[in-house]
Amino acid sequence: MKILNFKILSEGDIVEKVEANQVHVRKEDGTYIVYTLHTDNPQFMEFDAFVIQKGEGFIAIKDNADLSDLDKTLGKSNDKAD
């Protein structure tokens, strides 16, 4: 699996929708922003999971990922409490 991780959110932001190469975000103060992923390189847009998280505009691609990598990206642990 290929994971595209897009870190653009601030505390209180809400992703309203993802449409084609655009991510629509409502900021905590009510401002509405549309982020556009530039798709000039079609290989960049080939992914299986698209993760949008809190961050400062960082974009990363993880090739040959599995579900445990997705859990790590989301900050989840596979450890089970007894």
Image (cartoon, helix red, strand yellow):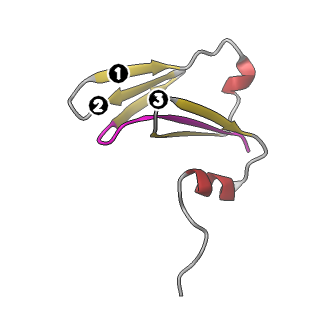
Closer to us: 17 or 25:
25
Report the residue at 75% width, 23% height from top: 43
Q: Amino acid at mark 2?
A: Lys
Measured from the top left, where is residue 21 in percent x and y? 54, 21
7 sits left or right of 26 in the view: right
Q: CA distance from mark 3 to mark 2?
A: 15 Å
> Disc 3 marks which residue?
18
Indicate the quadrant where residue 69 lies. bottom right
Q: CA distance from mark 1 to mark 2?
A: 8 Å
Indicate the quadrant where residue 4 lies. top right
32 sits left or right of 36 in the view: left
Are circles 1 and 2 on residues that touch, CB within 8 Å? yes
Taking 2 as reference, is 75 above or below it?
below
Measured from the top left, where is residue 49 in percent x and y? 62, 41
> Disc 1 marks which residue?
33
Closer to us: 6 or 42:
6
Measured from the top left, where is residue 12 in percent x and y? 29, 41
Label 3 or label 1, whichever comes before in sequence order:
3
> Disc 2 marks which residue?
27
Report the residue at 35% width, 21% height from top: 33
Are circles 3 and 1 on residues that touch, CB within 8 Å? no
Report the residue at 46% width, 29% height from top: 18
Circle 2 packing at 10 Å, graded few (<14), some (14-19), many (20+), is some
Circle 3 packing at 10 Å, graded few (<14), some (14-19), many (20+), is some
Measured from the top left, where is residue 66 in percent x and y? 72, 53
Q: CA distance from mark 3 to mark 1?
A: 12 Å
> In the image as oriented, which residue stretches furthest toward the top?
40
Segment colored magenta: 1-13
